[in-house]
Image: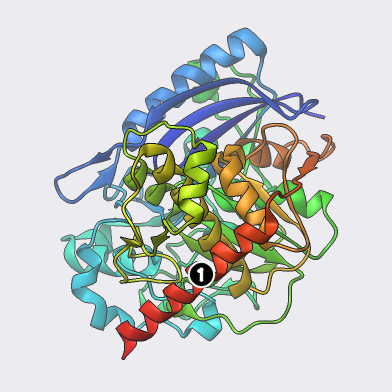
Amino acid sequence: MSRHIAVIDVGKTNAKLALVDAATLTEIAVVTRPNTVLTGPPYPHFDLRGHWAFFLTHLSSFHAKYEIDAISITTHGAAAVLLDLDGQLAAPMLDYEYNGPDAMQAEYNALRPDFAATGSPRLGAGLNLGAQLHWLFATQNGLTDRCAHILTYPQYWGYLLTGAMATDVTSLGCHTDLWTPQRSAFSTLVDQLGLAGKIAPARHSSDVLGTISSDIAARTGLRRDTQVHCGIHDSNASLYPYLRSHPSPFSIVSTGTWVVAMAIGGAPVTLDPARDTLINVNALGAPVPSARFMGGRAYELIRGTCTATPTRADRDAVLAGIALYPSVAMDSGPFQNQPHQWSKTPQNDGQKMLALSWYLAMMTDHCLSLIGAQGPTVIEGPFAKNDDFIQMLAALRPAGVEVAASATGTSVGAALLASPDAPLPKTRKIAPKDIACLRRYSADWAQIVTTREDTQCA
């Protein structure tokens, strides 16, 4: 069993390098840098060069202090890197929140496959990777000829480390329009966009991509036989440990900038792409009904600089009728294009923080219902430390809510790809309090949300 796994972990907000001890599933060293979007030219893009220098520096220092046995990779989705024949960047990596691709919606919509084939809803800006590629090839002079290879984002870092090119099924299955989950094959869009022969072969996340190149070994001090695993989409990294530890049915809620709910073995449902439901693809290549919203973004927008802890008086005031209605991040989630509003303005920061946490929990519960989630729900990521969020969700999910007994998350999930014999994470079951009060509050919230939605549609 590999003991020390270095994990390149790039989220939408931060990029980090973590060193995971596979014997204890703990991060023994972590360094981070902001995932700052460069404004251009030619368009908003990610700082790949800066990230690479950062990763090399800290791979070297981690290895000198602890020794690295293997490397694994996890990144956010809706991302790919375009390379030329020499393996250099053919174009900067587009920020998926840039709305440039929206200018070509009609043209792209005529090309993309149906939701029934891909499980990929039509999303704005560059959240459909296919829309990014369509826009890039149409607007960047010479790119069609210049681009020789397309790699999904985790595999770009793997390519820099090993020289091997690939895509992975979890990244391709992340609302790209490029993959058909039920067939485990590329969609018709690949040919429509002229990507056949350019997009790298699809591999499973746990596959060994290769060993580090002699150049990387010389620059970092790592052993030349250090294996690099193919890599995984970050929400699926959160899911992966529980695919191995939990019997079906169960669900995972991966929290961060995005809150992503994923149901394993749930009730049959008809997914509604207008509600931001979709099919993800897990590390084993299987389809996973999912729903999501930008919960972490909503939390930061409403919270601002507030760090207050709600008091009992704050709780009583919020229960008496202070509620936040969707949607804070209007371009995602089940209630898109509905501007958020307060039932009553909170009178202090404690009330605001409590109503915000409950709002996020009720949104999460709604997402779980949309995907037919059954069995216990495991909360991963930052929201697992928010007791008000957890208590509300536990009150609303009869089959129970669990949180990891120790810190896990994307880095540990990615590390398990490289250490399949490592012990699996244990969870702690949440005992909800004041269930009747919280359910009554949620029922009132749901009734108002439904009324607002009906009024908007009328």
List the residue tagged with mark 1.
444
The answer to whether 23 is drawn above or below residue 201 in the figure is above
Query: Where does the N terminus fall, quadrant-wise?
Result: top right
The answer to whether 276 is drawn above or below residue 363 in the figure is below
Residue ID at (61%, 53%): 392
Q: Tag count in the figure? A: 1
Whether residue 87 is visible here, answered yes or no, is yes
Residue ID at (35%, 58%): 328
Residue 149 image offset from top left, x and y in percent: 41, 55
Q: Quadrant of residue 101?
A: bottom left
Q: Is 46 or 332 nearer to us in this picture?
A: 332
Secondary element at tag 1: helix
Q: How is the image coloured?
A: rainbow
* Relative to 140, 45 lies left or right: right
Query: Where does the C terminus fall, quadrant-wise?
Result: bottom left
Whether residue 76 is visible here, answered yes or no, is no
Hey, what amino acid is under mark 1? Answer: Asp
* Relative to 188, 99 lies left or right: left
Residue 286 image offset from top left, x and y in percent: 70, 67
Residue ID at (61%, 36%): 411
* Relative to 332, 282 lies left or right: right
Q: Is 15 or 382 nearer to us in this picture?
A: 382
The answer to whether 372 is drawn above or below residue 259 in the figure is below
From this viewpoint, which residue is outermost toward the top? 65
How packed is label 1: few (under 14 Cα within 10 Å), some, or many (20 or more)? few
The answer to whether 95 is drawn above or below residue 406 in the figure is below
Residue 400 image offset from top left, x and y in percent: 76, 56
